């Protein structure tokens, strides 16, 4: 075999050896700040989903019996979406406490 054939064979073997090692691995490890950023992004998405779900639940709540006023004889109208408070400024703790109140209301309705 000639020297060129040996070089070609050697390079081919090196490539065949390195290909399985590189599969499904990132080129470099993520830094701690990148991992923290991805974690924070996941938490933010989860809080936004909870907030949207809570807004939908709040829109569906029917208030208790209203006092009879002169015009509607005890009937209470459902608030419009634009009349509901904006929940974007709520913290996760506020959302959790509102969820607890909703659960209590649902349990008392069932009893």
Image (cartoon, rainbow, N blue to C red):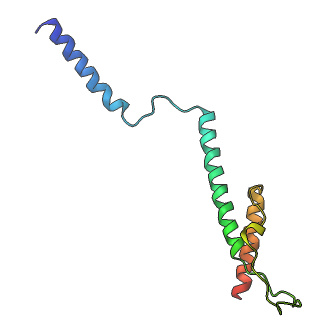
5 to 50, vertically: above or below? above
Q: Residue at x 24, y 21 (%)?
A: 13
Q: Please identify the quarter of the rendering in which residue 67 is found.
A: bottom right
In this rendered view, identify the residue nearer to me: 73 or 33: 73
Q: Could you say where residue 43 lies in the image, as x and y percent from the top left? A: 64, 50
Does residue 34 appear to the left or right of 72 in the view shown? left
In this rendered view, identify the residue nearer to me: 80 or 30: 80
Q: Residue at x 72, y 71 (%)?
A: 58
In this rendered view, identify the residue nearer to me: 79 or 11: 79
Q: Quadrant of the N terminus?
A: top left
Does residue 16 appear to the left or right of 90 in the view shown? left
Q: Could you say where residue 55 lies in the image, as x and y percent from the top left? A: 70, 66
102 to 38, vertically: above or below? below
Q: Please identify the quarter of the rendering in which residue 9 is found.
A: top left
Q: Could you say where residue 64 lies in the image, as x and y percent from the top left? A: 79, 84
Q: Please identify the quarter of the rendering in which residue 97 is found.
A: bottom right
Q: Quadrant of the C terminus?
A: bottom right
**Most distant residue in the front direction:** 71
Q: Residue at x 76, y 75 (%)?
A: 79
Q: Could you say where residue 39 lies in the image, as x and y percent from the top left? A: 62, 45
3 to 69, vertically: above or below? above
Q: Residue at x 66, y 50 (%)?
A: 44
**Most distant residue in the left direction:** 1
């Amino acid at each position: 075999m000639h020297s060129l054939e040996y070089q070609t064979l050697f390079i081919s073997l090196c490539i065949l050896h390195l290909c399985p090692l590189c599969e499904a691995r990132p080129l470099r490890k993520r830094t701690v700040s990148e991992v923290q950023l991805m974690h924070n992004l996941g938490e933010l998405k989860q809080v936004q989903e909870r907030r949207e779900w809570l807004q939908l639940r709040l829109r569906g709540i029917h208030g208790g019996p209203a006092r009879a006023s002169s015009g509607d004889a005890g009937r209470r109208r459902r608030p419009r979406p634009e009349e509901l408070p904006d929940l974007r400024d709520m913290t996760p703790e506020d959302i959790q406490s509102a969820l607890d109140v909703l659960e209590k209301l649902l349990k008392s309705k069932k009893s």
